[in-house]
Image (cartoon, coloured by chain):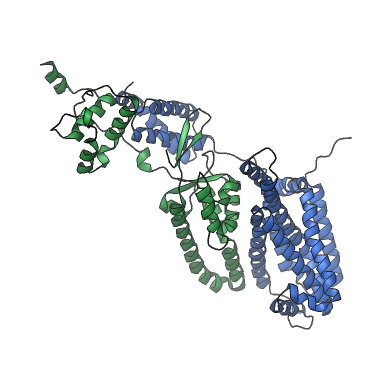
Chain colours: A blue, B green
Amino acid sequence: MRQEVFERERAPRWQHFEALLRALDEKRASDDFPRQYRLLCQDLVLARDRQFDAPLVERLNALALRGHQHLYAARIAGGGFLDLFLRRFPRAVRREWRLVAWMCLFFYGTGALIFYFTLRDPDFVYSVVGSGQVAEVEGMYDPSSEHFGKPRQATEGVGMFFFYVGNNVSVAFRTFAGGILFGIGSLLIILFNGLALGAIAAHIVNVGYGGTFFPFVIGHGSFELSAIVLAGVAGLRMGLALIVTGARSRGEMLREATLRCVPILYGMTGMLVFAAVLEALWSGQPAIPASVRYWVGAGLWLLVVLWLAFGGRRWRSA
Amino acid sequence: MIDTLYHVEAPEGVDLALRLAGPTPRAIAYIADIAIRFFFYIVASFPLRALLDDVGGGIGFMLMALGEVIYPVLFEVFGDGQTLGKRMVGLRVVHADGTRIQWRASVLRNLLLFVDWLPGTYLFAAASMLISRRFQRIGDHAAGTLVVYAEAPEAVQRAAPAPSSEEPAAPAIPLALAERAALLAFGGRSGTFSAARREELASLATPLLRAGEPAAAQLEAVAAHLRGAERSLRGAAERAR
């Protein structure tokens, strides 16, 4: 079949296919579409094989591509938010339990070590954290400063919520993204945060402000610190996929690892948002006695551990 | 042949061709996106501050801190792979198998923009694109995505074939397949060249040409023959005489 005959004969079919595509763009599906798509694919193969001219082949290719995108619009089976947070996220975390253990060791281990050193040698804090930041932290937790004892305005709390979300989520995203540099970026950010946390906590004890600092951080710390650790876990998983490839290519390993990380990314972002709610509306309330805040804080830590350890677990029937 | 065409094999056994976009158009689209975002920040920050005070300040900070992720993800997922900058340049993000981009891949590729930005000059992105056969930056590698040219609407909208202006004429000598293809391509595209360029290109095909007559018209006649154009009645009648 010569090109002009071919074009004349098939033109109505192609126009029909275009109409179907336009209908699909407007979310109107048609039972006829898959069949028309296969016919169009045949026409494209034929046009290429017969070496018909470039504009015709390009047109058929463009039509087939749009059809392909409609037919194979990858619909990811998602069970919505509840399923993600109650099941898929804890499962994804448990799947990486070794990395979670290592990251906790890096983060809390360095924190504890620096906490100990700074308690013994108070000036040590200045070799970890800049003196400007030390003064700032002192100002925040000084019990004699005037912002303690004064209840917060509601709008101020809401404003702080958005501020905390912006700050913490962008730090966590960076912790994750840095992992693609063979895990180094994630490890460095986690280690540095562990260092700073240990040094500041010890310094607060040294200057005697522990009574305002610890009741403040224990509540939202459960969700916030765990989320940062999990961001590091996801980043390290990506980096390890580039190092330990087994018999497969780096690209393949990387894409599989990132797919596994996605529920962790969504989950830890949700945790940070919740931590920001706590930090803005609960942690800073001076009216609530410290003992209550300690107990609630401990309960929240337990909740995080139980949630990640048991969420979405399938119980074997005895 | 060095080409930016990338073929995806569809389950129907047909290769779909995608035209990959290189670093330059992508950089232009990206710069446009940055400009749009900052314009939005500036425009949004005043009413936010004025109407919502502390809350507005907080929202503004959050938008600034997370905008480089939120903005492209929302536009790519709901705008069929196109941020505003990509739309201006005519680019589109797709999965490596040619399908439309979804949440997961979009979130990954845009989170990893932070690494592509390192060391503060997008050097990693540029290096990654240049050593990649498919112009993928680091985020594209991790998410399995490609940036391609959006198919031009005029390519899709091509109307009925233009009627051949020339009487079809059989070639003077037998043609190989590649030669037929070259002539067909010339016939299909000759309308887009200037008359002088058309003539210059056509005059290269000396074995097919009768000397002394305009070369382009002769080749178009051969191309029309190869396309299978039917002779007009007048032409057939003349031939019969």
Residue B199: image quadrant is top left
Above or below, A198 against A53 in this view is below
- Residue A168 percent coordinates (x, y): 67, 63
The answer to whether residue B176 is left or right of residue A169 is left
For this rendering, which residue is in front, B234 or A54? Answer: A54
Q: Identify the residue at horizontal 57%, vertical 65% (top origin).
A: B64
In the current view of this chain or complex, which residue is farthest to the left?
B241
Q: Identify the residue at horizontal 41%, vertical 26% (top origin).
A: A43
- Residue B107 percent coordinates (x, y): 60, 51
Q: Identify the residue at horizontal 38%, vertical 38% (top origin).
A: B156
Q: Quadrant of the N terminus of chain B?
A: top left
Above or below, A98 against A170 in this view is above
The answer to whether residue A205 is left or right of residue B60 is right
Residue B78 in sight from this viewpoint: no
Residue A137 in sight from this viewpoint: yes
The answer to whether residue A74 is left or right of residue B166 is right
For this rendering, which residue is in front, A141 or B186? Answer: B186
Residue A188: image quadrant is bottom right
- Residue A89 percent coordinates (x, y): 72, 48
In the current view of this chain or complex, which residue is farthest to the top?
B240
For this rendering, which residue is in front, B67 or B136? Answer: B136
Q: Identify the residue at horizontal 42%, vertical 29% (top origin).
A: A44
The answer to whether residue B135 is left or right of residue A99 is left
Residue B50: image quadrant is bottom right
In the current view of this chain or complex, which residue is farthest to the right?
A318
